[in-house]
Amino acid sequence: MFKEALLNLSRRKSRTVLALVGIILGVAAIITLVSVVDGVASNAEDYLSEFKGISVTQKDVVTPLYSSFDSEFLNKVESIPGVNIVVSAVVGLSNVTEQKRGVRFSKERTMMQMTSEIVSLLGVDLKNYSRVHGTVTPLIGELEEGRNLKMGDVGKTVISRELADNYRKRIGNSIELADKKFDIVGISKSGVSFGGMMSGTAVVSIDDAREMLDLEKDKVGLLYVEPIDFSNTKQVANRINFVYGDDLEANIQGDFLGQAMGIFSSLRSLVYVVGAISAIVAGIGILNVMLMSVLERTREFGTLRAVGWLSSDVMKMVLFESVLLGVIGGLLGLLFGVFISFQITALSGLNTLVSFEVLFFSFMFALAVSVLAGIYPAFRASKMSVMEALRNE
Amino acid sequence: MNEKPGEKILEAVNVTKHYRMGNVTVKALDGVSIEIKHGEFLVIMGPSGSGKSTLLHLLGALDLPSSGTLLINGKDISQFDDFQLSMFRRNYLGFIFQTFNLVPTLNCLENVLVSLLPSGVKFEDEKHAVELLKLVELGHRINHRPNMLSGGERQRVSIARALMNDPPLLLADEPTGNLDSVSGGKIMSFLKDLNRKEGVTILIVTHDRDMALYADKIINIRDGKLLDVEVLKDRKIHKKHKKVMV
Ligand SMILES: Nc1ncnc2c1ncn2[C@@H]1O[C@H](COP(=O)(O)OP(=O)(O)OP(=O)(O)O)[C@@H](O)[C@H]1O
Ligand SMILES: [Mg+2]
């Protein structure tokens, strides 16, 4: 009987191939779609988890660019219970004052080129900087290469990947910002840039930044606050707002967190919705291909029962066929799906995440659908008299 | 079970078969009662559409009557369960369909052996199947699949399949309908031998009066009703088939 099942599969080549293609595409579609959405969701999750402290700016400013307040607030905020570290910083815009390498200088510089020279500048007070756990502002992403700034790093900078790539800079090179030469000690993943026009961000010491931005020594633009216990972040932010609410505004980084959690959980549910939709579509595809032959097979099952097969013999044969199809198609589908996901990442840079759950689920799903679709005609035929099955058109 | 020659192997009691097609009800069989004894060689004749195939399917337990009773060796087939029906069809009955009903994915040899596939095919079975294919002059077509065969060749494969398990009962729906008179004649005399020498009970549907002359009796059917039974030979039946129904 197993031989018959194998014969059926191998001799009905076109149908077997069609069914396999149906299963493979179904499984691959589920894996690809879910892995893309999952990748985006987990990217967002990673990104948000970097910003875990509190940022304090002047009250009612649109962006930290316009924020400026007395530096004595540093000590005041530091003395609030629950506060661990406070780093003061200034934020501003600067520009790269050297030619892009490989681009020939011409008088007609385009708007694009000019704006691409503007960078977001973050000047941090290096006194406490090396003690922080999180990321000081959304301006800077995680460090990719090199090191962070430390005490005494005057004339040194950490630039974003974007900026480094634009000007073909590596660690150890220098870059000219506002006619001042900086040694590049580290390269970070790019963070959020204001307006998206800037070619990147640069982190320098607060003293360098004040000089470049022409800011007063006793003013700061931003305080980055880390609580002793990160689970108390919200309470600490509330305390700062309660005590200094007239002048300052403390926000959990990325205001983020609140909204962020919202975005994050809706991304998660998007994964499930996309997964469910692709499963339905894939399921219909597989069912369609498998059921195409219901009528033809119903007649065949009638013949088998007419010569003395038990209904259960017919069922066993079909089950064997379907499981074989489901397993082969499912496995090929897994490979194909994972391959496509990798290709998407390789070609578009879009992060994809192929989780074990989606592999397991899509495989089991394909198996279940192909078994159901295979068994259905056999079950139907077993409910008919032999002649009814044989007469089936 | 004592299955002596001359006792009833099949019996239809007031059997009807209706087909509903929308509002119209086709009475394919309308109150037919017949009995067939062990060792008999019978022929059913009647015009096209008179219900011959329908009757044969009911007698072979392949279809259910709308009303009436069918008995096999005195047992009501409506009481048979799936296992009993399957045993009956596999070991006791050889059925030759008017439309052949071969399995398209299997070659001739596998089609002849198809009833044995669930339990496993032994070497002797395969040898027997090849002999049967040679007998119906298809020794050279063993590995061909039905779609490569002519109508007459398919018919002969289905004859070989019906004979595979040495059934004591053979029901054949126009088994020579697609054959020329020479091959048809060969098949008929082979069947007659089976009947005489092995004691196989045979019931054949045919249009062909020449073929009918091989039989002991002719059952004439018109419009789903039994018209009459012509007795051609009043033969005393001695031979008993070696197999009994379990
Ligand atoms: N599935 C069906 N649905 C409706 N009517 C049917 C069906 N099968 C058979 N019939 C009708 O029942 C009647 C008897 O059919 P049957 O096949 O028994 O005839 P037959 O005597 O074998 O004819 P032939 O010599 O042409 O094979 C015919 O009128 C036919 O149209
Ligand atoms: Mg007929």
Image (tube, rainbow, N blue to C red):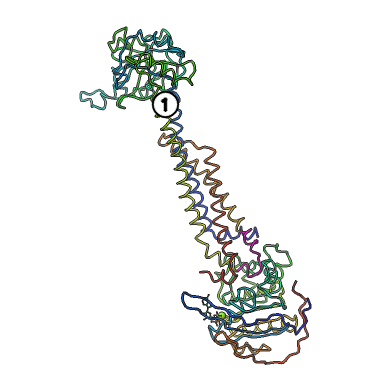
> Secondary structure beneath disc 1?
helix
| Magenta segment, prevailing SS (helix, strand or loop) | helix
| Amino acid type assigned to the residue bearing label 1 in the image | Leu
Position of A117 relative to B246 (above/below)? above
Query: Is B96 situated above or below A340?
Result: below
* B51 vs A8: above or below: below
- At a point 62% along the width and 91% down the height, the residue shown is B228
Q: Is residue A94 visible?
A: no
In the rendered view, does A68 fall on the left or right side of A108? right
Q: Quadrant of the N terminus of chain B?
A: bottom right
Seen from this angle, which residue lies furthest left?
A107
Q: Is residue A354 left or right of residue A310?
A: left
Q: Position of residue B121 (x, y in %)?
A: 70, 64
Is the CB–ligand 1 distance for label 1 below 8 Å? no
Chain ID at mark 1: A
Front residue of this view, candidates A319 and A134 = A134
| Residue denoted by label 1 | A257
Residue A310 shown in magenta: yes
Q: The magenta stretch spans which residues?
A: A303-317
